[in-house]
Image (cartoon, helix red, strand yellow):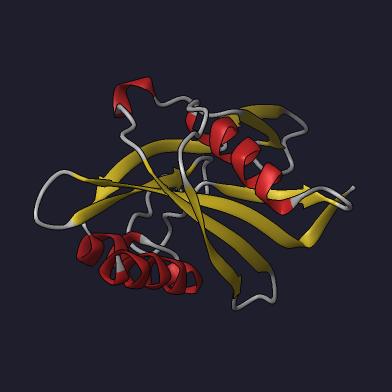
Amino acid sequence: MPNSRNSAGLLMYRRCGPEPEVLLVHPGGPFWSKRDDGVWSIPKGLYEAGENPFDAAKREFEEETGCRPAGDFMALGEFKQPGGKVISAWAFEGDFDLAAFRSNLFSIEWPPRSGRQKEFPEADRAGWFVPALAARKLLQGQLPILDALLARLRAK
């Protein structure tokens, strides 16, 4: 059974200019379709009781992007979110072709109280962002994840 208080995710980054870029995903579904700044996320999701968070992070990344993560991973830490959830996050260097993006689907009743189920992608798009733009796009509670990655990259 998923633990609704804990999730795990991966933050992919690449170095292709003067600043690194990070890969973020935009949430799918009708509630998010007209929102942009402050709603993007690292690919992440809930994990099962007893499941290894790092394994869950890799699974969730693949489910939300269609890309199997590989490389050298660095632990960024655990980040408490405003609602109380804790995200365990790792980062890795890679280069994902946005044309290959595909996300798993979820079902909800839509329109509300219609009795009809409709499927939506968990993430409806992905994008590469330099740190300043990523900070504007990301959910507020995930900014410390970006900051942790940037601090690690500066220390290298």
Farthest-out residue, left: 18
Residue 136 percent across, percent down from the top left:
29, 66
Q: Quadrant of residue 116?
A: top right
Q: Residue at 38% of width from left, 64% of height from top?
A: 149
Q: Residue at 15% of width from left, 58% of height from top?
A: 19
72 or 79: which is nearer to us? 72
Against 151, is 87 above or below?
Answer: above
The reply to whether residue 134 is visible in this rendering is: yes
The reply to whether residue 121 is visible in this rendering is: no
Residue 36 percent across, percent down from the top left:
34, 54
Residue 140 percent across, percent down from the top left:
44, 73
Direction from residue 51 to residue 116 in the image, left or right: left
54 or 39: which is nearer to us? 54
Q: Residue at 24% of width from left, 63% of height from top?
A: 131
143 or 109: which is nearer to us? 143
Give the quadrant of the C terminus: bottom left
124 or 65: which is nearer to us? 65
